[in-house]
Image (cartoon, helix red, strand yellow):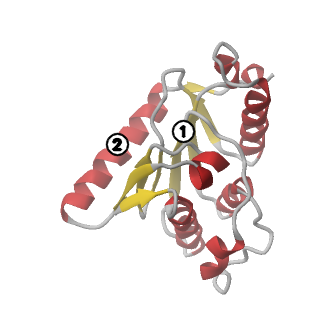
Amino acid sequence: VHVTEENVAIIDVDLLIHECLRASEGKKAFAYIVSPFIADFPLASTWLSFVSNVIDVSDIDSYVDLIGLLRHHGVSVKIVTRSPSDLTTTTISRRFIERQARTLSQLAEIGCEIRTNASLHAKATVTMKGVLSGSFNLTQSGRIFNLEAGFYFPNTRGTEKREYEEKLHWAEKIFAESTPLTESALD
């Protein structure tokens, strides 16, 4: 499935909500989130309305809230990003670096495993349901405003299944090879 700025956020939310539903049924559930830049952003209520009769999403206003819902259901959330301390040597604005540090602090506080990789440029969300990968950072601009492109590979059969399994192994490997986020990196 081709992904653009018009459907990336909906696909991403669907992947993550699916993991909540799996976990609530006692099934294996996980999420790998890979993005060099991460900043919390508001979610449109319409992105969540399709599950509101199955799972309580009344308090979900932002992406961090959604990740909190996953953690509430016991879903393992593993994140690979760039360290805010590494970003200080780039042309990224100080304001954005502080926002990334704040978002990562919130994610760490709710129990996400966060690792950093100074060379990271890839972007992907990998769950039991499928893989979303493309050019979009995990920011409001990347998920809503910018002209972006990518692909969605469901965990089904055939070529899509092979693509899914390759991306899952890649996410596991990049997470294992990255450095655990330290508190000093957030200062």
- Above or below 27: residue 39: above
Mark 2 belongs to which amino acid?
Answer: His
**Mark 2 residue crowding within 10 angstroms, few (<14) / some (14–19) / many (20+):** few
Quarter assignment of residue 54 = bottom right
In percent of width and height, residue 68 lies at 72, 57
Q: Evaluate whether residue 168 shows in this view.
A: yes
Closer to the eye: label 2 or 1: 1
In percent of width and height, residue 75 lies at 59, 58
* Residue that lies at the very extreme toward the left in this rendered image: 158
- Above or below 131: residue 107: above
In percent of width and height, residue 40 lies at 72, 48
Q: Evaluate whether residue 76 shows in this view.
A: no
Q: Nearer the viewer, residue 187 or 111?
A: 187
Identify the residue position indicated by label 2 in the image: 169
Secondary structure beneath dot 1 equals loop
Identify the residue position indicated by label 1 in the image: 35
Q: Nearer the viewer, residue 111 or 106?
A: 106
Can you say which quadrant of the picture contains the C terminus?
Answer: top right
Can you say which quadrant of the picture contains the N terminus?
Answer: bottom left
**Mark 1 residue crowding within 10 angstroms, few (<14) / some (14–19) / many (20+):** many
Mark 1 belongs to which amino acid?
Answer: Ser
Of labels 2 and 1, earlier in sequence is 1
Q: Residue at x 71, y 73 (%)?
A: 45
